[in-house]
Image (cartoon, rainbow, N blue to C red):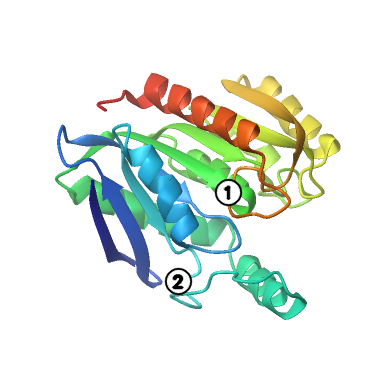
Amino acid sequence: MIEHHLDIPTADGAMNSFIVHPEEGGPHPVVLFYMDAPGKREELHDMARRLASVGYLVVLPNLYHRRTRDFWLQERTEPAMAVMFEHMASLNRATTEVDTRAMLAFVDAHPAADASRIGAVGYCMSGPFVMWAAADFADRLRCIASIHGANMATEQPDSPHRMPPLIRCESYFACAETDKWAPPTDIAKLQAALQAAGTPHRIEWYPGTEHGFVFPLRAGAYHRAAAERHWERLFSLFGRSLGRVG
């Protein structure tokens, strides 16, 4: 595997990112990996490596680059969580558009990337981000996945559940059975919007899970069987929509 830690230039400054792809068999289809709120960290690097190991070039940026290059939540203390939520609140559809545009320009120029085949996955806070990316770059993204995505139906005009009429690609949503950030009422609104728009999609509930169940280091939330199911679903989605070379 080939790995790089490098800066991707954006309209808002340098976005430090982790890039990983197989050594052979390129150019590779691309997966844009949008992080969860605790930040870009080795746990996510390992998840990106797992995606890359089956044939993809994965781009994992630090979405907090406008505020910090190295934040990640090391302890779930009240002060640390407060800082995390401040960083999280700094992101929106506009910042997602800037960062996604920069990632697309990066893979367009990368010799190991097949930029005609691009998908995206977003975890937790980034569930809305992949919806916005698919809406704003409908001609570029072939598929998206939201894994226990948070705030999927809000009162804002750019709420994720208002995006389906703009989205043309296939989408997948993995939902935890217990998740205060994505209660069944919100997911019902999302599903109704997807159905009304005729957007290809699948919403899947994961019984016995709570928010964050895919992360191996998330004490008390990690659910190994459910996490492995999510990998199976991602590999199926990306393999179907992007092709697989690994």
Please say if 227 is above or below 127.
Answer: above
Name the secondary structure under disc 2. loop
User: Picture coordinates of residue 181 (x, y %)?
Assistant: 77, 50
Please say if 163 is above or below 7.
Answer: above
For the residues labelled 2 and 1, say whether their Cβ atoms are less than 8 Å apart. Answer: no
Name the secondary structure under disc 1. loop
Numbered label attached to residue 216: 1
- Please give the residue where the numbered disc 2 appears in the rendered image: 65
Q: Quadrant of the C terminus?
A: top left
Tell me if residue 46 can be seen.
Answer: yes
User: Picture coordinates of residue 240 (x, y %)?
Assistant: 40, 19
Query: Is residue 192 found left or right of 117 in the rendered image?
Result: right
User: Picture coordinates of residue 5 (x, y %)?
Assistant: 29, 64
The amino acid beneath tag 1 is: Pro
Which is nearer the N-term, disc 2 or disc 1?
2
Count residues near mark 1 (Cα–Cα under 10 Å), then give few for <14, some for 14-19, many for 20+.
some
Q: Residue at x 42, y 50 (%)?
A: 46
Please say if 23 is above or below 94.
Answer: above
Q: Residue at x 39, y 38 (%)?
A: 51
User: Picture coordinates of residue 24 (x, y %)?
Assistant: 14, 36
Where, by quadrant of the figure, is residue 147 drawn? Answer: top right
The amino acid beneath tag 2 is: His
